[in-house]
Image (cartoon, rainbow, N blue to C red):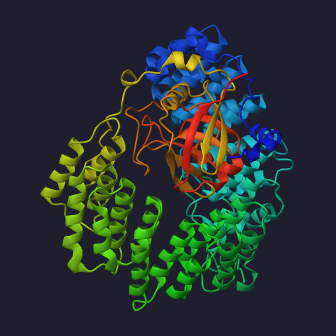
Amino acid sequence: MPIRSFRFWPLLLLAAACARTPRPSAGLANKYHDATIRQIGTAQDERNTAAILPFLTNSNPTYRREAALALASVQAPAAVPGLIPLLRDADPGVRRAAAYALGQTGDSTAVDSLRVRVLLEKDGTVRRYVHEALGRTVTRHSLPELWRVEILNDTSRAAALAWGLSRASLRGLVSPESIRRTVLVLNSPKLPVRGRLAAVVALSRTRGLDADLKRLAESTLLRLVQKDRSYAVRAAAASTLGKIANLPDMASMPVPPTPVNMAPQAPSPAVKTPPAARQAAAMLTRLATKDPDYRVRLSAIRALPFDAENYPASRKAVFTALNRDQPAVALTAAEWLLAHAKGESGALLAALADGNRQASVRVRAALLRAAVRHASPAARPSLVETISKRYPAAPTVYEKGFLLEALSEDPAAFDFVRTEAFAAGQSPVVAGYALGALLTMRRSADFPAGRQADFAAAMRQALASGDVAQLGTAAEALADAKIYPEAQPADLAALRQAQAKLQLPREIEAWQGLQQALDKLEKAPKPTPSPLATAAQHPIDWAVVQGVPLGQQVRLRTSKGIILLELKPEKAPGAVASFVTLIGQHFYDNLYFHRVVPNFVAQGGDPRGDGNGSAPYNLRSEFGDLRYEEGSVGLASAGKDTESCQFFITHTPTPHLDGRYPIFAQVVGGMDVVHKLDIGDQILGVELVAVP
C-alpha cells in the first residue's frame, strides 16, 4: 500500500513538537543504561515506595528527579512528606517532577505546600506544574486556593491557572466562581493555545451549572468557536455550547445557592433569552456543516439541541452531514438521529440507510437501528425482517455485530438474537454483540413480561459459557435492580462458579465485572480489591529496554495505510519492552481495530477482536510526564496496573486520560490514516524501523 503521508513529514513533525521534551536524535541510548536509574525503575515497577524514598535526598539531581517521577506512577500517599521538600529544590527539573508526582498522588495534605509554591515559584513551566498539581489535590472546601494569586496580565500565571482549573473540573470540582475565573483566563491577552484548551476543557466538563455557563461564558465561547485557530479549542467550545443550547429559555433563572465553605459571590441579574435569539443553537448548526476541521463539525453535531424549537435546524445540519461528510461525521449524525429523532418515520430512516451506498457499513447499520427504534409498531416487523435477511450475508463479524445492535431495538427479535449468541462455533465477536443486544432488549419498556424467564435463562447460559464477554454482560444484567429486583442464591452461586474458572491475570477484566456484581448484590460495605499481577509475575526486561534507542520508530501497517510510531522508552519502559517483544513474536499481525470512537480513539491489539482479550500477563501502570495529544499511543486497561497488549491512538488532545493510561509512543507519520480507521480495519503487520 502506498505511503501517502510521507511527503508531509515536516508538517507532522511540527505538530508533534507539542511533546513535553524536544524530539531526541535517533540512535541515542536511553537513560536506562544507567544502573541507578534501572534500580529506581525496578522499584517503581514493584511498587516499592520504601526503596524509592531514599533517592529523593540523593546528592545527584538526576536521581532525585527520577525518584519523584517513579512515585508519580506508584501514587502512594506515604511518599507525600518526602516529595513536598522537593518543591523547594534548587533544580527546576526536580521541582517540576515533584509537583507532577504530588498531583498524580492526589493527596489533599499537599494543598497548603502547593499553594505556597504557586506564590513563590519563578520558573513559568514549574509554576504551571504546581498549579496543575493543586487542581488535582484541592477539595471542594479548598477549591478557592486555585485563584488566590492575582494574575492581572501575567500570561504565564493565567495559563498555569487554566491548567489548575481544568484538573479540578475534570474531578468534578466546579462552582459559579470557578466558571467566572475560567472565563477571565480565556479572555486573557495572548494566552497560549495549551492554556486556552485547558480552560475550555474546564468549562466543557462542568456538571450541574449549565445556567451559570450560559450567564458567564456564552459570549466567550461564541467568540472562540468562530475565531480560535486551534481545532481542539473550537471543538471543546462547541461541546460546551451544547450545554447552553439545550437549556430551556430562562425567564428568571435564580442564582444557585453558594456552596458551604465558599465565599459568597455578588448575585448577577436574571437573564431572559428570547426564543429567536438562541445564539448557541444557531452557531452549532453552522459549525456542524461549515467548520473546516471534521472534529469540530463532529463535536457540533453531538451538541446540537433537540427541543421542538431547534429540531428543524438541527435536523437539516444532520442530514447534510449524512449525505456529504466523511464517515466519522456521518456516523455521528446517524447516532444523533438514533438518540434524538422526533417525528421521523422508520421508512425514511431505513431509506437513508439504503439510499447512501457511499456510507460505511457502520453508518448504514446505525441508521437501520434508528429506523427500528423510531418506527411505528406496525412498521417494525418489516424492518426487523429486512435486517434479519441481510444478516447472513454480512461479510465480517463486525458488520454482523452492527446489525445485531440494530435488532436490539425490537424485543420481537429476541429469539433470532439469542440463537446467534449461543450458536455452535460462533465468533466471540458476534456472541458478545448478540448478548449485549439481548440486554438492550430487556431494558426496553416494550419488553414482554412473559419473556423474562427466557431472558433469565439466556443469562444463566452466558454465565455457564465461560466466554469473558458474555460473562461481563450477564454480570451487568444480574446487578441491575430493575431487571433482577431480588438476587437469588442460584444467581450468586453461578457468578462465583464463573469467576472461579477465570484465568488470572489474563481475564482480570471479566473477574472485576463478576466481582462488582457480587459486591452489589451482596451489599458489600466497600469494593473487593482486584487480585492484581505483581512485578514478579512479569518483570521489566531491562535488556529489551536498553536495546530501544531514543527515536526508535515502529511501522504499523493497516488495511487503511501505514502509521509510523515513535516509542517512548524513557517514559514507559515496561510498556515499550512488552510492545517490542510482542512485535518480535508477530503477536499483532492480522489483528483488528475493534473500537473506534470518532474524535476520541482508535483501539486495537486484542487477540479476540472484541476488546476482552489480553496477553497472558499484566503490566504495572507507568504514568510518565506526558500529555495525551493528537496521535498519542496509550495502553488500554481495566484500572491501574492491568495493562497488557491492547493499545489506542488518540484523534485529538484528550486531557481526561492524562495520568490514567500510560503513553508509550507517539504517531510521527500517517496521522491521516489514523483518522480513517474504523471498526474492523486490520493490522496487517508491525515491525521496528531500522535506526540509522
Q: Position of residue 668 (x, y in %)?
A: 71, 38
Residue 113 shows up from this direction = no
Choose between 288 and 307: the one closer to the eye.
288
Residue 499 appears in the figure = yes
Nearer to the camera, 428 or 255: 428
Q: Is residue 663 above or below residue 675?
A: above
Q: Compared with residue 645, is residue 322 higher up or lower down, i.e. above or below?
A: below
Left or right of 44 on screen, residue 513: left
Occupied quadrant, residue 362? bottom right
Residue at image coords 43%, 65%: 400
Residue 159 at what x, y percent from top left?
Answer: 76, 43
658 above or below 72?
below
Q: Quadrant of the C terminus?
A: top right
Q: Relative to 472, say whether 60 is above or below.
A: above
Most extreme residue toward the left, as rendered?
489
Q: Position of residue 518 (x, y in %)?
A: 24, 51
The residue nearer to you, when weighing 222 against 463, is 463
Residue 278 occupies quadrant: bottom right
Image coordinates for residue 529, horizontal then vertical, percent: 32, 38
Q: Nearer the viewer, residue 17 or 167?
A: 17
Q: How many marks?
A: 0
Q: Residue at x 58, y 47 (%)?
A: 656
